[in-house]
Amino acid sequence: MLTSLIIAESVSVTALSSFFKRETFVLAGSALTYQEGLNLIVSCKPDIVYIDVSVVREHYEELQLIKDQHCFIVLCNGVREFDVLKGFGTGCLLKPFTFESFRNSVGLLSKFLFGSPDSDQSLEIERDYFALKVEGRGLKPVKFYFKDVLYIKAEKKYIRLFCIDGRSYSSKNTLSDLENALPLKLFIRTHKSYIVNISAMVMIKRDLIALSYGQQLIPIGRTYLDNIRKHINAGLLKDSKRKKNGNSTCTLFLGVLFFVQELPSVVEFFV
């Protein structure tokens, strides 16, 4: 759900606050001064910041540094006031405010930030990569090549992507969003909280998966065992005869030994 912050004079704060009470939109806080508002932006990390045009004029250079990290809606007396700001802000809300104009602004921003059921703009899938909006990286989706992603983990209201370079990224998409969109031949759901890149798997032992990078062991949920079996049976995790000095990877699955051709390196296995 979208969270918002108001930085404006008391009249505007009172009017906009009353609108939030009439809907399920979340108001994280409000401030009468720029410095107080800046502190709230840092602590609350709102999706939308409603900010008075006078505050933008006075602190224009400072706001340029954070303008891409949040959606700024400028509170103006007229469109010309917004135009002279040279593109600062996602849009403007004209005074005197009405509930309908406020509601429309939130609806449009919701589609802009998270997409709509018919067209999800927050997650893009291409031939060899996907792109999604991540926390702290502005409004433009960040591109992730399939080969660079180790696994994806659900963390409360967010998901976190872990990459082979050791970096991780947080996003407001759900694990189900990615599970439904990512290629089945490349990624597999192994647990209610995990999706794993198949090419990064080097060993499966009972209820744990070892990866080619890092020390993290990925759990296998009981309800996902059948899904893993189906991948093996469908050839997405292909088994083959062991080559004595070959490059096949051995994988122990519930006590049954499989040799997986696609996996990247030879690993030891234990019964």
Image (cartoon, rainbow, N blue to C red):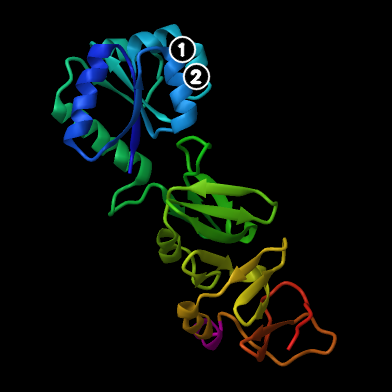
270 vs 92: above or below: below
The prevailing secondary structure element of the residues shown in magenta is helix
- Residue 80 badge: none
In screen coordinates, is 75 left or right of 37?
Answer: left
Q: Residue at x 55, y 69 (%)?
A: 186
In screen coordinates, is 92 left or right of 181?
Answer: left
127 vs 184: above or below: above
* Residue with the mark numbered 1: 60
Q: Residues within 10 Å of mark 1 (few under 14, many from 20)?
A: some
* Residue with the mark numbered 2: 64
Q: Residue at x 34, y 12 (%)?
A: 53
Residue projecting furthest to the right: 245
Q: Find the magenta span and give its range.
A: 230-235
In screen coordinates, is 12 left or right of 5?
Answer: left
243 vs 99: above or below: below
Question: x, y (%) of residue 51?
Answer: 35, 19
Number of marks in picture: 2
Q: Is residue 34 magenta?
A: no
The quadrant in which the N terminus is found is top left
In-front residue for pair 44/166 = 44
Residue contact between numbered discs 1 and 2, judged by CB atoms under 8 Å: yes
Secondary structure under tag 1 reads helix
In-front residue for pair 176/156 = 156
Q: Residue at x 52, y 85 (%)?
A: 229
In screen coordinates, is 104 left or right of 50?
Answer: left
